[in-house]
Amino acid sequence: MKLQRFLSRIIPVACILLLGSCTDSVTTATKLLQQLQQQGLMGEVKRNFDTKQIKRGHEIFIKNCAICHGQNGEGTADWRKPLVNGRYPPPPLDSTAHAWHHSTEELKRFILKGGPPGEGRMPEWQDKLSEQEIDDILVWVKSLWSEEIYEAWYRQIENR
Ligand code: HEC
């Protein structure tokens, strides 16, 4: 039950950074993941991404986002700990943090509009990147998630 240990570790800190509505979806996603595992229902959702779009997304990410989130979306090692100024460092976008607790629409809106005022330093991208470019980045981000995380996200967050 490695995954459950991992989840119970991240949940208490999972939503500090973002959207208030996130707490509920995290609890629900965790419960769902446990139910799916108990019922042996995991493994049915498959990603069917276009490899060219993944590549394009990664290239756009490297040019614009890697300076903060790392070349492979690994973020800051100590991303749970606020900096001296009280703000949080850029989190990982892979399955180790909580980007996967948000639907595509929420992630897209967040990237377009940037972080909430007074919280972090996530800039807004609405005047710098097209929606297509952000879609490409998000496909790449989702390609980083593990099979289990992607499936829980797809079933409970994206299609809730
Ligand atoms: C100047 C540093 C910086 C850059 C550049 C940056 N980010 Fe961020 N990003 C942050 C910080 C800091 C946060 C945490 C939220 C906050 O405090 O605003 C964040 C949060 C996020 C989140 C939410 C993650 C979660 O766990 O819910 C996503 C998604 C994201 N960034 C994507 C991007 C993408 C895509 C780009 C490039 C187009 C980008 N970021 C560029 C600093 C940055």
Image (cartoon, grey):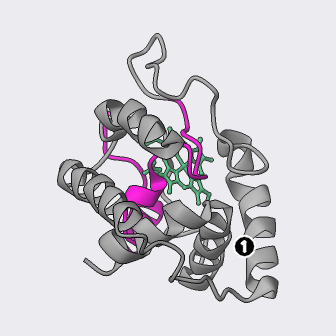
Residue at the spot 61% in from the left edge and 72% down from the top edge = 129
The answer to whether residue 112 is magenta is yes
Residue under pointer 1: 57
Picture coordinates of residue 54 (x, y %)? 74, 77
Q: Does the segment drawn in magenta span residue 97?
A: yes
Look at 49% across and 45% down and name the residue there. 3
Give the x, y percent position of residue 127: 53, 69
Q: Is residue 15 rendered to the left or right of residue 40?
A: left
Compare residues 132 and 95 and report the one nearer the observer.
95
Q: Nearer the viewer, residue 94 or 138?
A: 94
Tell me residue 66's x, y (percent).
Answer: 73, 48
Quadrant of image for the C terminus: bottom left
Tell me the SS state at disc 1.
helix
48, above or below 97, in the image: below
Whether residue 50 is visible here, answered yes or no, is yes
Q: Which span is picked out in magenta?
A: 89-118
Dividing the picture into quarters, in which one does residue 53 lie? bottom right
Three-letter residue code for mark 1? Gly
Residue extending furthest toward the front: 39
Q: Position of residue 146 (x, y in %)?
A: 61, 60
